[in-house]
Amino acid sequence: MTKTKFLELINFLQKNHKVYGPVLDRANRLLVREIKKTEHLVLDGRLTHYSFKNLFLPDCEPLFDYDHQKLKEPNYSYEKRAIVGMTISDLKALELYDQVFAKDPYYQERKRQTLVIGYGIASKKSYSEELIYVQQFEENILEHIKFDIFLELNSDKTDKIFNGSNLIFVGSEEGMKVLDGFGYKNYDKIEYVGPIKEEGLDRTMMAINDKMKKSYTKKIWENIGKRCIECGQCTLVCPTCYCFRIDDEPSLDRSKGKRVRCWDACMYHEFSEISGKTRLLKNTEQRMWFWFYHKFVRIPEKYKIPGCVKCGRCSRVCPVDIDFMKVLQDVLKS
Amino acid sequence: MLNPYQTKLVVIKRVIKESSDVKRFVLEFENNVDKENFNFIPGQFIKVSIPGLGDAPFSFGTSPRIKENFEIAVRAVGNLTNFLNRMQIGQRLGLRGPYGNGFPMDIIKKRNVLIVSGGCGFVPFKSIIDDYLIDRKNYHGKFQIFYGARSFDDLLFSSNFEKWENNKIDLKLMVDKEDNMCKDSQYKCNVGLVTELIKNEDLVEKPVVLVCGPPIMVKFVILELDKLSIPHSDIFVSLERRMECGIGVCEHCAIGPYYVCKDGPVFAWDKIEWIPNII
Ligand SMILES: Cc1cc2nc3c(=O)[nH]c(=O)nc-3n(C[C@H](O)[C@H](O)[C@H](O)COP(=O)(O)OP(=O)(O)OC[C@H]3O[C@@H](n4cnc5c(N)ncnc54)[C@H](O)[C@@H]3O)c2cc1C
Ligand code: SF4
Ligand code: SF4
């Protein structure tokens, strides 16, 4: 599929979907926004600054309108959307939300109304630092991620990534219906076979899991605990950070209001606070360990999929230059 | 799809003052179907919702065999609990749950049981004791209780103590400071920490030990039990953590690989003792 054709597909979708995808802001950061004009869409192989999680798990969403003791689900209708430009790592995170929020009616309804169009660059050539996370085009990877439509770009030139041979895959009925409606037949069907490859979970991930469970290497956690300033940026950009708080927001008439679910961050002091200002995660060192333990032990043990999709967004935003991949190396060596 | 955050309505049937800052509430479902479908295990908890203030976890304080209503006991420590403790008979509350695993009742029914508790941590044990009183034929061991609080007034459920003793429960009380109320009571006022009871009293033979109370108490109780070489797999601790969702998703109550709201709040000590800063 040529670039022109792909943008025509976006135009076609815009007729009855709100289309979201990566666009550049003034500071030259890639952000996920509604695409009003297709020429704004940027698919150049770079990861978006924030992940796509906000579109699936909004940073604050009303769970209920309350009136005295009664809780009523807000009756807004979920918009029909198409989300374009999710990379393989973003799609892996989506698989995790599917499992974590399997019984969450808000997430499920939102997801049901969403057409997911992923993309990736399959190239033999190694790209610059910034692009390396997007690639991960491991063999048969498409069978292990869920999407409706996937655009595979085959190009060796970062500035002309649409110029190679581009392939289109469909991963769902819905994706197929859309392409049929659009009048494009030249696609391949991919059968989703589950998130895990035959050889099991990623070996490095398993090794980290094992190390984290076997020992608490104080030196590592103390060291990053001293450096981290608890700004929470890493949790904000990380696609696999999904923890939340539930808060009530009363209106002027205090018997009415909203019960909302908002993102939280385990890097914040209040995260583990119970009455009497007791904090069960007492310091930065403990909170750091908690963060890693979630990604590398709790998630893989509970959901049997990796808790880190190796997008590298965390290291990229950290103001004190904590290199999370380096921390993992240290854990492996410990 | 069922909404896991939706609440069911209960009516406050009675309010009983248990101490200067704790009240006991008798709650009954408004809807009969809710009432019939409601089951729980001692040690599980519910989340009580007060729109405007959020929801908070509380343990059951009565036997699951009583179907008509159930009780919670609430210490006023913050926003929601202070509001709750000002509520009156006839007012309604929303709740969701029950959540958590509860105590290992099959083990408890077979063995000698030692309960060690401090302050509000005693509430879930009241559920076990009530159940024992109703269903004694199915409990095959002895019951021993070491219960401590700041003062005699702070000991919850004191109106039940006599009944417990009449039913062969070995009850030992401990207060931080001796006061007149304690002196005037029919009970021996041991003064000090609840751990001293473990040191000074004869324990029931080969007990399964159930512990719930402030973290610092739990820590010293375990040190004391260690001196008696009680296996850690025979010690069950009920933990308190911050909880938002109650269903193992929000991450607030996570400890190592577990979720206190789902895998707990009751854990065999050998399963969790290795977790850094667990208590
Ligand atoms: C499994 C379990 C069983 C409990 N059983 C009882 C009981 O039987 N009787 C009793 O009096 N107390 C019990 N508690 C403690 C009780 O839940 C807290 O005292 C209560 O949540 C405090 O709420 P607050 O709004 O009054 O306090 P504030 O200090 O005003 O607010 C505390 C904030 O933290 C949140 N929070 C979430 N979880 C907790 C928590 N565990 N402790 C404190 N704050 C929390 C609250 O919702 C609130 O947003 C139990 C706690 C747990 C985890
Ligand atoms: S690389 Fe960092 S930001 Fe990306 S998934 Fe892993 S922990 Fe999260
Ligand atoms: S981005 Fe860096 S400094 Fe900020 S909370 Fe994360 S690790 Fe700490």
Image (cartoon, grey):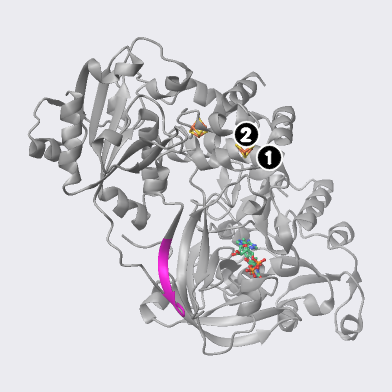
Across and down, in percent, residue A106 comes to 35, 56
**Is B103 placed left or right of A262 in the picture?**
right
Q: Residues within 10 Å of mark 1 (few under 14, many from 20)?
A: some
Local secondary structure at mark 1: loop
Residue B221 seen in render: yes
The residue identified by callout 2 is A319
Q: Ligand 3 near label 1 (Cβ, under 8 Å)?
A: yes
Q: Is residue A295 above or below residue B62?
A: above
Q: Residue at x 79, y 45 (%)?
A: B229
Q: Residue at x 73, y 78 (%)?
A: B21
Q: Nearer the viewer, residue A55 or B175?
A: A55
Say which label, 2 or 1, has the lower sequence index.
1
Range of the magenta residues? A62-69
Tag 1: amino acid? Ile
Question: Mark 1 belongs to which subunit?
Answer: A
Q: Residues within 10 Å of mark 2 (few under 14, many from 20)?
A: few
Q: Quadrant of the N terminus of chain B?
A: bottom left
Is the magenta region chiefly helix, strand or loop? strand
Q: Nearer the viewer, residue B20 or A164?
A: A164
Tag 2: amino acid? Pro
- Res B148 quadrant in image: bottom right
Q: Ligand 3 near label 2 (Cβ, under 8 Å)?
A: yes
Q: Quadrant of ligand 1?
A: bottom right
Q: Is residue A279 above or below residue B16?
A: above
Across and down, in percent, residue A31 comes to 41, 38
Question: Mark 2 belongs to which subunit?
Answer: A
- Res A143 quadrant in image: top left
The residue identified by callout 1 is A229
Across and down, in percent, residue A128 comes to 45, 15
